[in-house]
Image (cartoon, helix red, strand yellow):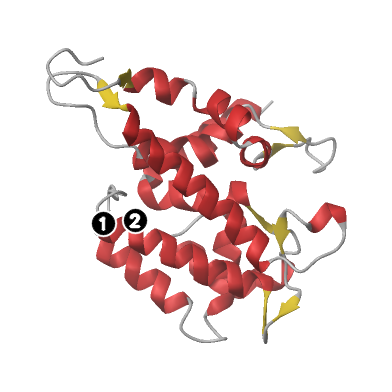
Amino acid sequence: KQPDTQQFVVDRDSVVKNLDKMMAAAFPRTFESCSTFLQDCDWRGQNCKPSSVSFERSCGIAMDEILSGPMPGTNNLSTGDLDVLTILALAMEATIDTCNVQDEDDQRDSLHWSLVDGGDELDCGFVKAKDVVNRLMESKILQVKGVDSGVIKLMLDFTSATFITRPMGKVAMIRGQLSVTDLLWNELTFWAYRKGATVGSLYALISDIADSERARGIEKGRGEKARP
C-alpha cells in the first residue's frame, strides 16, 4: 500500500519485466500469438522457430507504452492502472474472433482474405484495429513517439478510405509495421501476403505506431545477430 493514499501499488519496472508471465497466465492465447509473431529461419526460409525477441516486439512495446507513467516521486503504479492491459487484450482477441469466419483449426486465430459481409476478414479487422488505435491516441493513453499522432491518424484513415488503398492497411496489420514507405510497398506487394493477421501482429502494429524506433531497433538487432 502507498502509505499516504492507502492505494495498492506495484512497481512499474516489475510489471514491464513480467508482462510475458502475466499474459501467459491471464491471456494464454495472446501470449502464444505474441511469442510466435517473429520467426527465425535459416537462409532458405525453412526450419523456423519463434524468435527470442518476438514477445517484446509485439506485445511488450505496446503494453509498456500503453501503461501509465509512475506516480510522482516513485516508480509505482496503482493496481487499477493495470486494467488497461486487460481491456486491450480483450479488444485484440475480440477483433480476431468477431472478424474470423474460418472453420479450419489452423486459421481460427488469424484473419485472411476470406470474404465476410461484402468485404473480407482483413477489411473487418483493419477497421476495428484502426478505431482502437485512434481512440487510444485521442484519449492520450497511447503517446506516439517520433511523429505527430495526427499524422498516424491521417495514414490510418487514408488506408481505409477506398478498396484501392485498403490493401496497404491490411498488409500493415499482417506485418505489424506502419510507415509511408511500408504502405507504398504494401500496395505493390499485397498479393504476395497469404499469411494472416494475428493478435500478435495487431500488437506489433501498435508497437510500431507507439515507438517505431524501438520496434525497428529490435528487428535490426535480431537481423544482425542472425548473420553468420
Locate the C terminus and report the quarter of the image it occupies: top right
Q: Residue furthest right?
A: 104
What crowding class fits label 2: few (fewer than 14 Cα within 10 Å), some (14-19), or many (20 or more)?
A: some
| Residue 101, x across and y down, in percent | 76, 69
Number of the label disc, if any, that sits on residue 183: none
Label 2 vs label 1: CA separation?
5 Å
CB-based contact (under 8 Å), mark 2 and mark 1? yes
Q: Nearer the viewer, residue 40 or 149?
A: 149
The spot of residue 135 in percent (x, y) is 34, 61
Task: Tell me if 41 is positioned left or right of 123 in this view.
Answer: right
Dividing the picture into quadrants, the one containing residue 113 is bottom right
Q: How many marks?
A: 2
Q: Residue at x 26, y 14 (%)?
A: 1
Q: Where is mark 1, residue-wise?
A: 139
Describe the element under mark 1 as helix, strand or loop: loop
> Relative to residue 207, is residue 72 depicted above or below?
above
Nearer-the-camera pick, 78 or 173: 78
Q: Is residue 52 visible?
A: yes
Residue pointed to by mark 2: 136
Residue found 46% across the figure and 83% down from its top: 161
For badge 2, the amino acid type reads Leu
Image coords of residue 142 (percent x, y): 32, 49
Q: Determine the residue positioned at 58% across, 60% down.
A: 95
Left or right: 171 as drawn, with respect to 104: left
Residue 220, given in percent of the width and then of the height, sits at 52, 37
- Identified by mark 1, the residue type is Ser
Q: Is residue 4 above or below residue 199?
A: above
Is disc 2 placed on a helix, strand or loop? Answer: helix
Mark 1 burial class by Cα count in 10 Å: few <14, some 14-19, many 20+: few
Note whether residue 220 is visible.
no
Residue 222 lies left or right of residue 18; in this view the side is right
